[in-house]
């Protein structure tokens, strides 16, 4: 009994110190100099440009990863083929290597001295230190989120509903749209949510390929670093509240989904 | 509308394992045949090859005169009932049954009112009228089994294939459903193959029983033929202890041909 | 039912994409042309002021509205980015060696770039001093004190930061003089100094925030200009500057990256921009922000009076120029790699 209380206490203290306190500090620091200073952080054109860029990057990377995540999960869960485990490992790759390394790989590929550097320069295509590079790096680091969320679910659900649909004369697309997708929709949404949070918050990989041009290639996390290093602490924390709020909203939606999702899963086990 | 099924020299291997090693089988139009055998004998693989859910390495399947190998899964138009039913769990009973009709190409898709009529008719057939808005999770095992059957019948299949149709049910429900299925078959007259590992079930229900072992058919014949003259020691051991009076298939058949004339689902 | 949800979320997604695209293409501050200045870490405030002055000057002279985009980071890292394809029209870096690297590795400008502008293309320079907590609680007076035990010294990573390399060489110059040219003793001193460094930031400004904002360390080895700025920002009641007996003349050169400027159609603008850095107006701004102007006559005497008199060694005289110093001390397997052991 005493051990249980102690353990709970330790956990609560730990959570407060390492999760709640930093979050609280972000908001306290942001509003330290009042609402006006807080708001003025968002009228800075560089801040607006960073927000625009982050939204654009997420608007490309998240749908891309949703589509390819579903495709990859479908392939892995519904078919048996040689190299399946290798593909699974490959999907996890972005989780297991440092984001900075992922960014550097793109520099090595598309940088001026990289493998495709001459070709890109000859054709006047800008990837590194421009928006395409930031999008690519973000897609890379956020790729596993959707696929990882769906694969176990698809594997657990098996292929019999799809097989049933096919024997009933449905086309592959009809089967996907009316049988597969409804069965994974909550998991898909969950994955998209996490993918989006990471896409908007990614620092390491984006930092390497961004070039840090203010108002042009700085995303919100990079802009926060710029403000911090400009001794502009209040503005840094003000912009940071955006990411913190995104995190909180994600957490909230995630909890709602988990609750709803569990319900949804329970139905399949009910007999 | 039912057609005969001919299987010629079917072979199927998974990796190194030979699941089917040259199976030939003739099922007459309107016949009810059981594929019986211990687990791993290849009976389910045979059923899935006929359905087109697996591709054989060798041999062919014919529906009547049509070589089924040239038909895609959707063109085969077989009614397959899965062991765990594989009902669409996010659709209610009516939508489950209507699925195959709604999935048809626009040109040949029935109107929504025709679909609704057909669903009603099938609900009547499986005696579940009034439950059309239930979800699969809200049904008993036996009810799910019947919904799966209605869903398969909705597309007016050439043949009906059932994989362990009573496997997931308890003994009492099993008995009732067995009788009900026999009657239903008699009434609709679909060429039907079903897989089972239960000897009683096979001999009580089927017109003919094919006993599989190790990817081969060891013997095929009417229940009395097999019980009277087991061909091999394996068969003799396998059917040892079975002692039953098969349902009088001929009698029921005679009854029901009249029934078919009056309430044919194709009509 | 499900299909409705899918349709709805699809159209929602479409709306989000459209919205983002609208934001992304929303009219940017309209400008006739724009110039990218890739600079080192602590020049943020300096170029903010100079860019505003230059843009106004350019507008009155030509009628054109221009935007000058800035990128800041450790000098070595920034040079690497330009080599890898960052489309800088001009670079304003912490040391000549980094611009040499761009000329050598990417061939974007000629090797003799330094001769194209006065003072070896250095419009203003700085030097290296110490920043300590108010009252100097650890009694740090000169370079020798930094190698003492139980002290935490903050300096950035010489591999990525230009200021860090000046810091290293200034310490070396002092030790070389203090130990009468005994290289073994000098190396021992440097080893002990870097044993006191808990973390190497990638840029000088990162080190300054580590020391001044996060409160880590007893002494920051810093650009003179950044040390003064820290006093302005955080309050002269919190920190004070310690001037060592000897330091290094930290020349921070500038250059047009010819190939990029040509590709961007910015040759004329880029040259005018760098010329402006040598002009009295920019010199005055630089002196006001605690840089050492190449033309002191244009500066406010009050600003000049704040800059302490220090004995300064020169990179060419003391170390044989940047090409040699870079190779000896900072290349892979060089002296720094041999002496520095990261804390585990």
Image (cartoon, grey):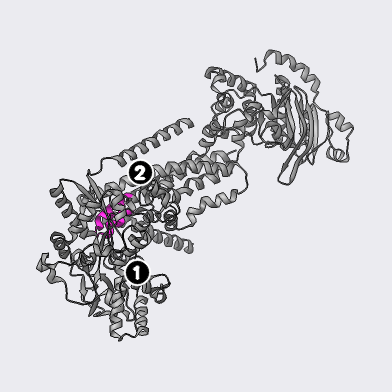
Chain part drawn in magenta: A222-242
Considering depth in this image, is A19 or A188 the residue closer to the camera?
A: A188
- Left or right? Give the position of C139 relative to A7: left
Visible in this render: residue C66? yes
Please provide percent x and percent y for residue A59: 38, 42
Assign a secondary structure to mark 2: helix
Q: CA distance from mark 2 to mark 1?
A: 36 Å
Q: Is residue C279 above or below residue B8?
A: below
Considering every residue shown, the one lying at the far left of the view is C301
User: Residue B194 magenta-drawn?
Assistant: no
Please provide percent x and percent y for residue C49: 18, 57
Q: Residue at x 42, y 61 (%)?
A: A9
| Crowd rating for badge 1 (residues with CA inside 10 Å; few <14, some 14–19, many 20+) | many
Where, by quadrant of the figure, is residue C286 drawn?
bottom left
Assign a secondary structure to mark 1: loop
| Crowd rating for badge 2 (residues with CA inside 10 Å; few <14, some 14–19, many 20+) | many
Q: Label 2 marks which chain's residue?
A: A
Considering depth in this image, is C123 or A211 the residue closer to the camera?
A: C123
Q: Is residue B47 above or below residue C272?
A: above
Visible in this render: residue C131? no
Please provide percent x and percent y for residue A85: 59, 50
Are discs 2 and 1 located on one and the same chain? no
Q: Which mark is residue A184?
A: none
Q: Which residue is mark 2?
A: A56
Considering depth in this image, is A113 or C202 the residue closer to the camera?
A: A113
Considering every residue shown, the one lying at the far right of the view is B229
Tell us which disc is closer to us: 2 or 1: 1
Where, by quadrant of the figure, is residue B4 drawn?
top right
Query: Which SS type dominates the magenta stretch?
Result: helix
- Left or right? Give the position of A99 relative to B32: left
Q: Which mark is residue C158?
A: 1
Q: Is residue A40 above or below residue C334?
A: above
């Amino acid at each position: 009994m005493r051990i249980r209380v102690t353990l709970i206490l330790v956990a609560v203290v730990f959570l407060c110190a390492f999760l709640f306190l930093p979050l609280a500090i972000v908001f306290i620091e942001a509003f330290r100099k009042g609402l006006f200073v807080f708001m003025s952080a968002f009228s800075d054109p560089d801040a607006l440009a960073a927000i625009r860029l982050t939204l654009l990057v997420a608007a490309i990377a998240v749908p891309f990863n949703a589509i390819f995540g579903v495709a990859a999960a479908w392939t892995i869960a519904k078919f048996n083929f040689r190299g399946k485990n290798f593909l699974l490992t490959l999907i996890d790759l972005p989780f297991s290597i440092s984001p900075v390394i992922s960014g550097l790989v793109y520099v090595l590929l598309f940088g001026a001295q990289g493998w495709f550097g001459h070709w890109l320069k000859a054709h006047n295509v800008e990837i590194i230190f421009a928006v395409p590079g930031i999008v690519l790096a973000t897609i890379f680091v956020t790729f596993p989120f959707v696929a990882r969320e769906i694969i176990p679910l698809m594997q657990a659900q098996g292929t019999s509903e799809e097989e049933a649909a096919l024997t009933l004369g449905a086309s592959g697309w009809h089967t996907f749209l009316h049988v597969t997708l409804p069965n994974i929709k909550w998991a898909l949404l969950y994955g998209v949510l996490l993918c989006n949070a990471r896409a908007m918050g990614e620092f390491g990989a984006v930092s390497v390929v961004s070039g840090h041009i203010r108002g042009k290639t700085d995303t919100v996390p990079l802009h926060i670093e710029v403000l911090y290093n400009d001794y502009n602490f209040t503005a840094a924390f003000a912009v940071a509240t955006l990411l913190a709020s995104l995190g909180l909203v994600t957490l909230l939606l995630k909890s709602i989904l988990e609750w709803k999702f569990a319900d949804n899963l329970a139905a399949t086990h009910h007999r | 509308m039912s057609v005969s099924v001919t299987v010629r020299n079917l072979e199927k291997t998974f990796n190194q394992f030979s699941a089917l090693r040259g199976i030939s089988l003739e099922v007459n139009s309107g016949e009810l045949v059981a594929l019986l055998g211990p687990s791993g004998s290849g009976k389910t693989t045979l059923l899935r090859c006929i359905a087109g859910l697996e591709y054989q390495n060798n041999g062919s399947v014919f529906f009547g005169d049509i070589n089924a190998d040239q038909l895609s899964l959707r063109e085969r138009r077989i009614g397959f009932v899965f062991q765990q039913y594989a009902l669409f769990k996010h659709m209610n009973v009516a939508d489950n049954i209507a699925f195959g009709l709604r999935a048809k190409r626009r040109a040949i898709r029935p109107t929504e009112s025709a679909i609704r009529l057909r669903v009603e008719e099938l609900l009547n057939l499986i005696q579940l009228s009034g439950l059309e808005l239930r979800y699969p999770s809200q049904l008993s095992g036996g009810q799910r089994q019947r919904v799966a059957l209605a869903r398969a019948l909705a597309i007016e299949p050439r043949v009906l294939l059932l994989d362990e149709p009573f496997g997931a049910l308890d003994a009492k429900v099993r008995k009732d459903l067995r009788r009900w299925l026999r009657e239903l078959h008699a009434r609709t007259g679909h060429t039907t193959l079903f897989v089972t590992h239960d000897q009683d079930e096979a001999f009580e229900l089927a017109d003919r029983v094919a006993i599989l072992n190790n990817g081969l058919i060891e013997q095929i014949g009417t229940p009395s033929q097999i019980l009277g003259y087991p061909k091999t020691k394996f068969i003799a051991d396998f059917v040892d202890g079975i002692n039953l009076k098969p349902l009088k298939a001929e009698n029921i058949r005679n009854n029901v041909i009249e029934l078919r004339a009056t309430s044919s689902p194709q009509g | 039912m499900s299909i409705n949800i899918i349709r709805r979320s699809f159209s929602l997604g479409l709306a989000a994409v459209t919205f983002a695209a609208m934001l992304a293409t929303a009219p940017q501050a309209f400008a006739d042309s724009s110039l990218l200045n890739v600079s080192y870490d602590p020049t943020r405030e300096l170029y903010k002021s100079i860019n505003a002055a230059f843009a106004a000057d350019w507008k009155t002279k030509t009628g054109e509205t221009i935007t000058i985009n800035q990128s800041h980071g450790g000098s070595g890292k920034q040079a690497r980015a330009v080599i890898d394809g960052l489309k800088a029209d001009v670079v304003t870096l912490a040391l000549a060696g980094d611009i040499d690297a761009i000329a050598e590795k990417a061939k974007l400008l000629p090797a003799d770039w330094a001769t194209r502008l006065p003072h070896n293309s250095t419009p203003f320079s700085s030097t290296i001093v110490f920043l300590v907590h108010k009252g100097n609680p650890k009694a740090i007076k000169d370079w020798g004190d930094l190698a003492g035990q139980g002290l935490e010294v903050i300096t950035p990573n010489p591999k990525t930061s230009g200021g860090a390399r000046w810091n290293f060489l200034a310490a070396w110059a002092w030790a070389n003089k203090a130990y009468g040219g005994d290289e073994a003793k000098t190396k021992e001193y440097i080893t002990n100094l870097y044993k006191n460094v808990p973390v190497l930031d990638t840029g000088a400004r990162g080190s300054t925030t580590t020391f001044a904002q996060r409160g880590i360390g007893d002494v920051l080895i810093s650009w003179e200009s950044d040390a003064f700025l820290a006093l302005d920002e955080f309050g002269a009641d919190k920190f004070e500057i310690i001037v060592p007996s000897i330091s290094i003349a930290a020349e921070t050169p500038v250059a047009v990256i010819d190939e990029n400027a040509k590709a961007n159609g910015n040759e004329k603008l880029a040259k005018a921009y760098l010329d402006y850095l040598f002009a009295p107006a920019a010199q005055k701004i630089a002196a006001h922000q605690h840089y050492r102007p190449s033309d002191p006559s244009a500066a406010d005497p009050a600003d000049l009076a704040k800059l302490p008199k220090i004995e300064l060694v020169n990179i060419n005289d003391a170390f044989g120029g940047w090409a040699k110093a870079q190779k000896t001390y900072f290349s892979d397997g060089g002296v720094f790699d041999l002496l520095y052991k990261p804390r585990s």
